[in-house]
Image (cartoon, rainbow, N blue to C red):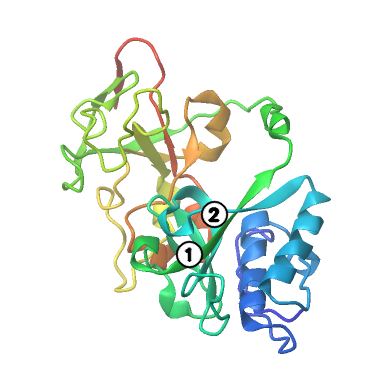
Amino acid sequence: MSVSLQACEDPYMIEVGLPEDQAIPEITRSFTACMPSVTETPVAEVPQPRADLPGAVAHWRSWLAGQGAGLVTVAKPAAFNWPGYWPAVLGQPGPRASADGARAVLMFGTPSGIVLSPQDPSLLGRVATDLSVREGYVFSGLDPASLAHASALPHLSGTVEAIALAERATGDMHTFNRANALANRGLDGDRYAAKAGTFTPAYDTARGYDLTLIEAEVLDSLTLPEGRVLGRAEVRRNIITRRIDLNAGRATVPGWRRQMPGAAPLRAVLAPRKPHHQRGAPRTDPPRGPRRRCS
């Protein structure tokens, strides 16, 4: 398997170009290239079957099953959103649709956007709702009970570098020295505490939408195309921390889940670097209990 690799911070965070084996359909090679970024499998260990995409998917399902995982087909891919990674095929829908012109890409986030496109890099940063999504897939563990066993977490400590709030959805974010955290709501004065955020759920039982955090170290490592540094309010996250691994705290807060830093245009800045858009940007809820002050 011939691929193009770029330097990454972690050997399992893989940036993969389009494999060169011309005996394999391009759509299959592109899907193959997306898989290491999702599974964190060394690229040499990912099978590259010489088959059309349906045949390759069947092969990958058998391979994943041996590792306790599955590849699930999305019933309505055009309307699908997922806060994690999911491979998609772009092209005209329908059972008779041709593979010609189809593109296999990697989607991420809600709303979902393209973070890896081996066949056509110009698609990076495009939002799924603006595209014709023909197929979608989700990687899933075969035994959900195995997710419940977690090792003890180390003691974590760090500092809050900035607090940012917006009164309404899509409104400008402003930084503050301190804020009050409201249980089951968010930060006082923020659109999510007012149940007016872009992704505020329709049901009060939903968790993980009230508070967003990101590591300052992640922002320090990013540079926008014009050369400037991303502003603290510009990233549209409530709390910016320093010297703490936010991903390591996933078991200590309710509704923890990874979240893409920033708005849709940032997908093109971050992609396809998984260390950035997986690292240090969770969405969660404030702890239950009395009002707490963040400063």
Q: Which mark is residue 85?
A: 2
From this viewpoint, is residue 102 visible?
yes
Q: Position of residue 57 (x, y in %)?
A: 71, 64
> Closer to the camera, 158 or 195?
195
Q: Position of residue 55 (x, y in %)?
A: 74, 70
Name the quarter where the C terminus is drawn. Answer: top left
Look at mark 1 in the image and give the residue it sits on: 115
Q: CA distance from mark 1 to mark 2?
A: 9 Å
Residue furthest bottom as drawn: 22
Left or right: 146, with 223 as reference point: right
* In the image, residue 203 above or below residue 236: above
- Which callout, 1 or 2, points at the residue further toward the start of the chain? 2
Q: Kindly identify the amino acid type of the residue bearing the numbered disc 2.
A: Tyr
Quarter-of-image position of residue 123: bottom left
Residues packed near mark 1 inside 10 Å, few (<14), some (14 to 19) or many (20 plus): many
> Closer to the camera, 227 or 1?
1
Name the quarter where the N terminus is drawn. Answer: bottom right
> Closer to the camera, 257 or 10?
257
Q: Secondary structure at mark 2?
A: strand
> Which residue is rendered at x = 49% and y = 80% of the image?
120
Q: Kindly identify the amino acid type of the residue bearing the numbered disc 1.
A: Val
Q: Mark 1–mark 2 contact, CB under 8 Å?
A: yes
Q: Secondary structure at mark 1?
A: strand
Q: Which mark is residue 162?
A: none
